Image (cartoon, rainbow, N blue to C red):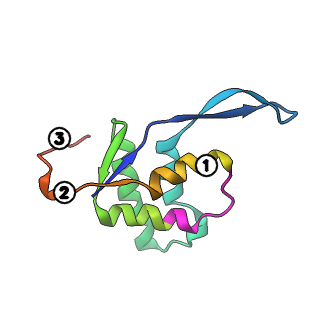
Amino acid sequence: MRKLNLENYSIPKRNERGEVDGAVPYQVKPSVIELLFSRQQGLNAVQLLERDELATKIHGYSGDTILLEDAEFVIIEKALDAVTGLGKEDVEFVKRIKQAEKIDGRNLKAVPKES
């Protein structure tokens, strides 16, 4: 299993001159969901439905950190690897996926399901 941090973080807000003018939240959960459906992956119908199931699970989760099965996490990693055009604001997002903590699922106690 993998532990994915879905908590938002701050990125610089830039004005029309490109100068930093405060901060705005980087929306992590919606970004993971959008990542799953990136057109750069060239998804077929089966892959699309598989990702929709995972996106629904992530969307419905209310906590800051979600535990995902290895097979689910591989889908997210492959989606990330297919995306191009990432920028400086995406570094933390990429780190959260690429460096997500591995959890030994055999030692977990029953965790209540989120709806």
- 45 over 4 or under it: above or below: below
Which quadrant of the rendered structure holds the N terminus? bottom left
Q: Is residue 61 left or right of residue 95?
A: left
Which residue position is annotated with label 1?
A: 90
Q: What stretch is highlighted in magenta?
A: 79-87
Report if the CB atoms under discs 2 and 1 are less than 8 Å apart. Answer: no
**Can you tell which quarter of the image residue 14 is in?**
top right
Q: In terms of depth relative to the viewer, which is nearer, 103 or 62? A: 103
Q: Position of residue 109 (x, y in %)?
A: 11, 46
**Can you tell which quarter of the image residue 10 is in?**
top right
Asked if residue 49 shows in the view, the reply is no
Of marks 2 and 3, which one's residue comes earlier in the chain? 2
Which residue position is annotated with label 2?
A: 105
Q: In terms of depth relative to the viewer, which is nearer, 97 or 71? A: 97
| 10 Å crowding of disc 1: few (<14), some (14-19), many (20+) | some
Q: Which residue is drawn at 25% across and 40% down?
A: 114
Q: Residue at x 34, y 35 (%)?
A: 62
Q: Does the magenta stretch include residue 81?
A: yes
Which residue position is annotated with label 3?
A: 112
Q: Measure the alpha-carbon separation of dots 2 and 3.
A: 14 Å
Q: Position of residue 104 (x, y in %)?
A: 21, 57
Q: Is residue 9 left or right of residue 73?
A: right
What's the amino acid at mark 1? Asp
- 84 over 64 or under it: above or below: below
